[in-house]
Amino acid sequence: MQLTSRLERLERRIPTLEQICSTICQPGVSLGVMYEGQTIFTHNIGYRDVETKAKPDENTLYCIGSLTKAFTAASLGILVDEKKVTWATTISSLYPELANEADPVIASRATLTDILSHRSGLANLDTLWQGIHNQILIDKGDAVKAVNSLPTACEFRAGFVYNNLLYSLAGNIIERFAGEDVDTWSSFMKTRIWEPLGMKRTTASARDWNSDENVATPYVTLTNGEPFKINPPAASDNTLIGSAGSIRSSVRELLIWSRAIMEAYTTEVRGSPLPLLFETRRTNPLREMKALFGAASIVDGRAPDLETYGFGWFRHSLPARIGVLSANHFVRNDIPALGISSGPLTTFSHGGSIAGYVSSIALFPESKSAVVVLANSNALGDAADWVSQDLIQVLFELTPEVDMVLEAEKTAKIYKEWFKRDLLEQWATNRKKGTCPGPAADYEGLYCLTSYAFTFRVWTDPDKPRQLKLTFNNIPSQTHNLTHYHHDVWSFLPETYDEFLRIGYLAWTQWTEFLIEFDRGTAGTVSGARWSAEGRLLQFKKKET
């Protein structure tokens, strides 16, 4: 009876879920709910492809973004169980070339635990690798060089600093210890996790999803509410950041994953043998679950529930504000907590966001429950987050009930105003009028970070001699038109939010990131440049020709 009543409540909630998606102009959503180890509710909204009007289903593949991190951590858990590596293994023992200039201590002491729990102290800087048009700027083999270039955000082990590049290193470590017959970290996941669990469609191979007919098309939502189709994320098992956010999966298979990981966790805590898996009747392959669900980092010590992070999982005890990685929290700091008047409820969760997709997963091991939501657009708000939170409060009858439609409406309004308020107006206010640039030839040349993993070239368009251009890492698709800002500072900020979205600047959130300030030496010639990436000033040297 209890199961039936929960299902009825969820089914009655469908109009509200659809209204949330309509409010933020979300093209398509797939969702699923598990309770007591059983999938009790799945539903799909809108279109996986707007042009063809193809609808999604529980098997539709979406890019799950940072939900990938839990698979990467689980793969390392298997290798730890096999004693091929330990959580205390230092990264420098595996990569002697790791030598971060900003803090040598990090290079010598950082362990697997540090990089998986985001407590290294190194700044994130997604703008170093996330290019426009959904491309990756840095090669997979240059992961260590890229990490060496990162500035620090805090002292080693002194705080939680989310970092995608370090999870890219974690994927490389899987490949090092996985065995000679494994060519990529995703091959290891396929043979050691996905196949034993019966996850036949989950993949990180571009070859697989490019040939699959049931894949959600990625979009961004323009200010008029219309979806704009964008390039699929280039991230895969053969690119940088792949092991941080490239896996494609479906609601059905993520619910299989949810049940398996909760079973592995609860049996490990109890010290009892793992039961055979429901789907395949094979032994559950997951190990070291207490480490994955542990509290290696304190995310927010001021939060009433002491929000922590293990390896690929946030831990909250409701009542709490969840979905902390969501873009909804990026534009708002007043989102209500769930379950303020309800009893304590422990959840392990994570969100994912990559251009064209958002995702959310929340596990509740005490009741063997899970909520999975996948969506195919960066809309006027994070649909996966809003829908997930609404499903959670309905599933567990949390009180007082938060009006998620109202919260989505507030956020959609802020989204439409954000670009003008935080970028354009700040850009215009800080501009010094009446200054003149030097000759275009002064600025032309190649500018390099110390590690040479990241460069940009300034050049003049032969067909437009007065038009300076900037190209990141010698990749033609990563070319930006420069306009004079003031003095020796040049800009490539788009004029409108819709242009910003179409080009794919989703990782760029500060107006100063669109400025390049050129430095002149004592002789008056340009010798270098400065670029502020995510608030961290990076110094580039001009390479002599």
Image: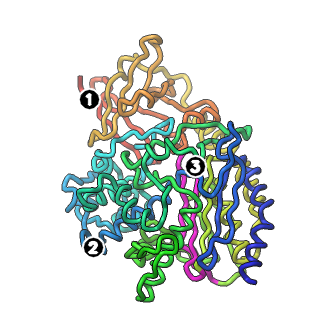
Of 177 and 409, nearer the camera is: 177
In percent of the image, x 56 and y 36: which residue is there? 430
Q: Residues within 10 Å of mark 1 (few under 14, many from 20)?
A: few
Q: CA distance from mark 1 to mark 3?
A: 38 Å
User: Which label sits in the foreground, 1 or 2?
Assistant: 2
Q: Closer to us: mark 2 or mark 3?
A: 2
Q: Residue at x 35, y 29 (%)?
A: 474
Q: Is residue 133 above or below residue 6?
A: above
Element assignment for label 3: strand
Q: How many marks?
A: 3
Numbered disc 1: secondary structure: loop
Amino acid marked by disc 3: Tyr
Q: Position of residue 1 (x, y in %)?
A: 75, 84
Q: Position of residue 268 (x, y in %)?
A: 42, 83
Task: Decide whether residue 352 is among the magenta residues.
Answer: yes
Residue drawn where x is 37% and y is 45% of the image: 239
Residue 543: give its label: 1
Display coloring = rainbow
Which residue is identified by label 3?
Answer: 357
Contact between marks 1 and 2 (CB within 8 A): the answer is no
Q: What range is drawn magenta here? A: 344-367
Q: Quadrant of residue 372?
A: bottom right
The residue under label 1 is which amino acid type? Lys
Q: Which residue is mark 2?
A: 82
Q: Which numbered dot is residue 190?
A: none
Quadrant of the image occupied by residue 285: bottom left
